[in-house]
Amino acid sequence: MFSAVFRDLVRHEFRSKGNWKKQNRTRIPRGWWRAYFLCILVAMIGTATYFALRNDLQVNAIWSITLGFPYIVFFLGFGSVKNEWGNETYGWWLTIPESRMRLIAAKWLGSWLKVWAAILMLFVIASVYVMILSFTIPYYSFETAREFMATGIQWLSLIVTLSPLIIAAGILMGILQHTVIRPLAPILWVVFMAALGLTYSLTDIVIPESSFSPQQSLWVSYPLELPAIVAVDWILAFAVLRITAFLLEKKLDL
């Protein structure tokens, strides 16, 4: 079903580090970037712990740091295509003995696996942190940690299940920049950015605003409409990928 070439493409996309030419022009060593990240992480944990010790931390509010994820997911798909031109590897990519649909699908799947990996890592780190709070600070309990993880599963699973369409839209925009119909790009940028804004309305369906109140039960049932929303998302994602493959095959302007 999937050729060895396709699997290698997915693996390559999953491991891709972005625009390596731009990174090579950056004079700051990679080790320093890691140090900056650790400093930011320590500062965030330190701030959250300070408020936790004062009993001023509503742990479910920690998940608010993920509110920008839909936009990150979009630009993850967009960047997967942009990097081929930025690294000047698009010629190699286009000559790979696979159909245009499979080339696009490999980028889509590799990007989606990145989303899974990032969300799982974030969920584990945040859950471990809140568990530590529940065992060391008397204001919090195991029930606090359980409700925190339940809320995280609801919100993060929503991002994962809706991300296929968002990634596909990002890939479409990346390809559109290099086709004969690129004048449509500004219009589609407005449409896609507005559509991403609408995804936040789904938050109130899956995690009502009252869920962030410590007086309310955080576990709520998924709405009956959610499976239909997910199904439509996947169908539209496939349609967008087909359109993107068509543009790559017939409308590319090198």
Image (cartoon, grey):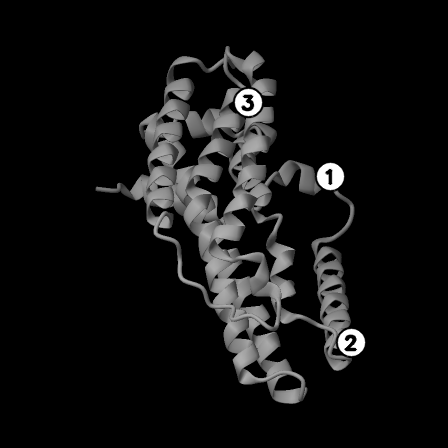
Q: Secondary structure at mark 2?
A: helix
Q: Are marks 2 and 1 in contact (CB under 8 Å)?
A: no
Residue kind at label 3, given as amino acid type: Leu
Residue reaching furthest left?
A: 1
Residue at the spot 61% in from the left edge and 72% down from the top edge: 214
Q: Nearer the viewer, residue 10 or 216?
A: 216
C-alpha span from label 1 to label 3: 31 Å
**Residue occupied by mark 3:** 188
Q: Nearer the viewer, residue 72 or 205?
A: 205
Image location of residue 2, percent across then percent down: 26, 42
Which numbered marker is on residue 25? Answer: 1
- Residue 12 seen: no
Residue kind at label 2, given as amino acid type: Tyr
Q: Earlier in the sequence, mark 3 or mark 2?
A: 2
Q: Secondary structure at mark 1?
A: helix
Q: Earlier in the sequence, mark 2 or mark 1?
A: 1
Residue at the spot 38% in from the left edge and 43% down from the top edge: 229
Nearest to viewer (mark 2 / mark 1): 2
**Residue occupied by mark 2:** 50
C-alpha span from label 3 to label 2: 44 Å
Residue kind at label 1, given as amino acid type: Arg
Q: Residues within 10 Å of mark 2 (few under 14, many from 20)?
A: few
Q: Residues within 10 Å of mark 1 (few under 14, many from 20)?
A: few
Q: Earlier in the sequence, mark 1 or mark 3?
A: 1
C-alpha span from label 2 to label 1: 39 Å
Q: Is residue 91 above or below residue 204?
A: above
Nearest to viewer (mark 1 / mark 3): 3
Q: Quadrant of the N terminus?
A: top left
